[in-house]
């Protein structure tokens, strides 16, 4: 990793504060689950820090569906997935990894379209001045993962190591979870981590909107294209009529001024209907990791 003028202990304290405080306040602010209306869950794969964006998304969905819409956030993927599988949420924007893990309990509602395709990549990121060419050059690193249930922020790297008969705890000197892709970027940029696994979509959008966060880092490796984090719902809908209305609202989002404004802020082209087989490559990675122990 390139040298830093900032004392490492100071960097770790500053970065740790930046990682922990927003996540803690987010969890406390979203404990209750409304009993009525449409309950839409959001995981950290989503850019939840922008209150204007959340307001526009909520306003559009309420107008398009015709019922109150509550946006439910949690700190981890596991918490949102548990609420979704137990039918305490009507739908949620989750990740491909929990979707394939719970495929028997979930149905695919819609998939975002980014840069013309319902696909994205996982990135390995490092210090911008570091001399490294691939994953094997990261042996012995302190490595930042996003979430243990994240495809791009964990599974892709875990599966790549499994292909070499390796495990993260033996390959890296230490790993930790930041519970947010933006936080992975912060961890690598500050020197808290020597490398990190991050959502390529989030990295790209953060680089566009907050270039000072990505400037100290670079993409070391990009994975193959994989199914973009989807909108999913319980296999047996909580309210079938509302789910149909939500699906229609997502697919027609680009036709509405409020919807287009939200899509622009998300840097998405829209949403599309896809077959669940889009996520088979992620399921294959999950199976490889499970088989490796």
Image: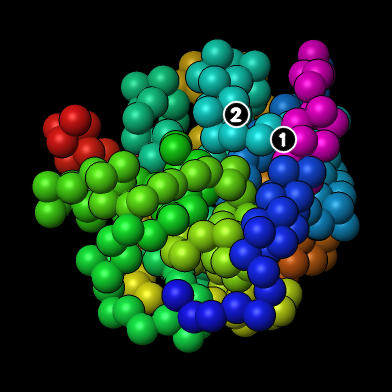
Residue 71 left/right relative to 11: right
| Quarter holding residue 241 | top right
Q: How many badges with numbers are in the image?
A: 2
Q: Residue drawn 58% across and 16% down?
A: 87
Instruction: Give the residue pinned by disc 2.
Output: 80
Give the mark nearer the N terminus: 1 vs 2: 1
Disc 1 element: strand
| Quarter holding residue 244 | top right
Q: Residue drawn 52% across and 43% down?
A: 177
Residue 235 makes an appearance in the image = yes
Residue 207 makes an appearance in the image = no
Q: Quadrant of the N terminus?
A: bottom left
Nearer the observer, 11 or 255:
11
**In the drawing, what numbered circle is on residue 34?**
none
- Specify the segment rendered in magenta: 22-35
Q: Residues within 10 Å of mark 2 (few under 14, many from 20)?
A: many
Q: Quadrant of the C terminus?
A: top left
Disc 2 element: helix
Nearer the observer, 13 or 199:
13
Q: Residue drawn 35% across and 71% down?
A: 222
Instruction: Give the residue pinned by disc 1.
Output: 73
């Amino acid at each position: 990793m390139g040298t830093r003028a900032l004392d490492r202990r100071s960097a770790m304290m500053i970065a740790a504060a930046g990682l922990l405080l927003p996540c803690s306040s987010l969890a406390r602010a979203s404990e209750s689950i409304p009993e009525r209306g449409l309950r839409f869950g959001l995981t950290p794969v989503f850019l939840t820090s922008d209150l204007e964006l959340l307001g526009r998304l909520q306003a559009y969905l309420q107008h398009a569906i015709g019922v109150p819409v509550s946006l439910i956030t949690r700190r981890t993927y596991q918490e949102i997935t548990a609420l979704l599988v137990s039918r305490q949420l009507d739908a949620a924007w989750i990740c491909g990894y929990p979707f394939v893990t719970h495929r028997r309990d979930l149905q695919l509602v819609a998939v975002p379209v980014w840069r013309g395709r319902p696909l994205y990549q996982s990135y390995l990121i490092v210090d911008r001045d570091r001399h490294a060419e691939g994953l094997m050059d990261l042996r012995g690193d302190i490595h930042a993962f996003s979430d243990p249930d994240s495809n791009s922020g964990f599974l892709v790297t875990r599966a790549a190591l499994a292909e070499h008969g390796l495990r993260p705890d033996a390959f890296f000197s230490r790993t930790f979870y930041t519970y947010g892709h933006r936080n992975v970027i912060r961890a690598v940029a500050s020197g808290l981590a020597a490398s990190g696994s991050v959502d390529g979509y989030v990295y790209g959008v953060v680089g566009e909107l907050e270039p000072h966060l990505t400037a100290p880092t670079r993409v070391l490796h990009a994975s193959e294209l994989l199914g973009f984090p989807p909108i999913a719902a319980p296999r047996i809908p909580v309210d079938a009529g509302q789910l149909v209305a939500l699906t229609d609202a997502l697919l027609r989002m680009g036709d509405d001024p409020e919807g287009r404004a939200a899509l622009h802020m998300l840097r998405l082209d829209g949403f599309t209907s896809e077959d669940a087989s889009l996520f088979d490559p992620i399921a294959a990675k999950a199976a490889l990791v499970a088989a490796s122990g």
